[in-house]
Amino acid sequence: MYGLVLLTVAVIFYNSAQPVTSSDETSKNVAEQIVSVLPSAQDATETPRGMREFVQQVRKAAHAVEFFALGAELSVLFYLFHKRLRLQTLWNTVSAALAIAVADESIQILSGRGPRVQDVLLDFCGALAATALCWLLFGVIYAVRHRKERRKEVYKPWAN
């Protein structure tokens, strides 16, 4: 699990270290592929301004998706480390995600791109969404296991 988290962080940092021209080109290529698949996106990208705005939306979505994956990985990692849900597990997850988001934006200074508080918040919200979803899933798993254990205790006809 550690390796997966480190790999995800490396990919995030690699993407942030890309020069402006390379990053813009990658985003534009992804946006063009989305437009070719989704007919509804073609209407919004008919003008050059519409395409620029769509590319920006793709960039923002990429931030959120990267950090959603990271938030899910961190949630599982800290859950496995603590062996149960605790406030400390939640705190570790969101603190690590926020620290990585800040570091990610700081790296952009070196690549000639400006860091944005908006991107830090977007990254953090992606990680928070994944954390909330994982905690919900962990809670359901716990409830199902706990219910099965209680049923085994209640239905022991041979115990009398």
Image (cartoon, rainbow, N blue to C red):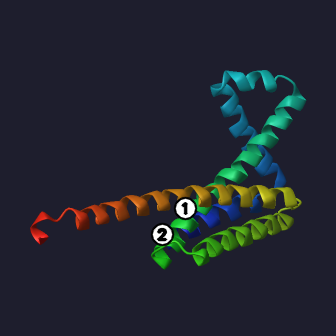
Image quarter of the C terminus = bottom left
First-in-chain label (2 vs 1): 2
Q: Which mark is residue 1?
A: 2
Quadrant in the rendering for residue 116: bottom right
- Which residue is painted at 61% across and 62% down in the image? 71
Q: Position of residue 65 (x, y in %)?
A: 65, 51
- Is 117 in front, or is 85? 85
Is residue 70 shown above or below 43? below
CA separation in Å, label 2 and label 1:
17 Å
Q: Residues within 10 Å of mark 1 (few under 14, many from 20)?
A: some
Q: Say what secondary structure mark 1 lies in.
A: helix
Name the spot of residue 94 as percent of width and height, x first: 67, 69
Q: Residue at x 73, y 72 (%)?
A: 99
| Residues at circles 2 and 1 in contact by the CB criterion of under 8 Å | no
Residue reaching furthest front? 160
- The quadrant in which residue 78 appears is bottom right
Q: Position of residue 102 (x, y in %)?
A: 78, 69
The amino acid on which the numbered mark 1 sits, given as a three-letter code, is: Trp
Tag 1 residue: 135
Q: Nearer the viewer, residue 75 or 154?
A: 154
> Dot 2, how many residues are within 10 Å of its Cα: few (below 14), some (14-19), or many (20+)?
few
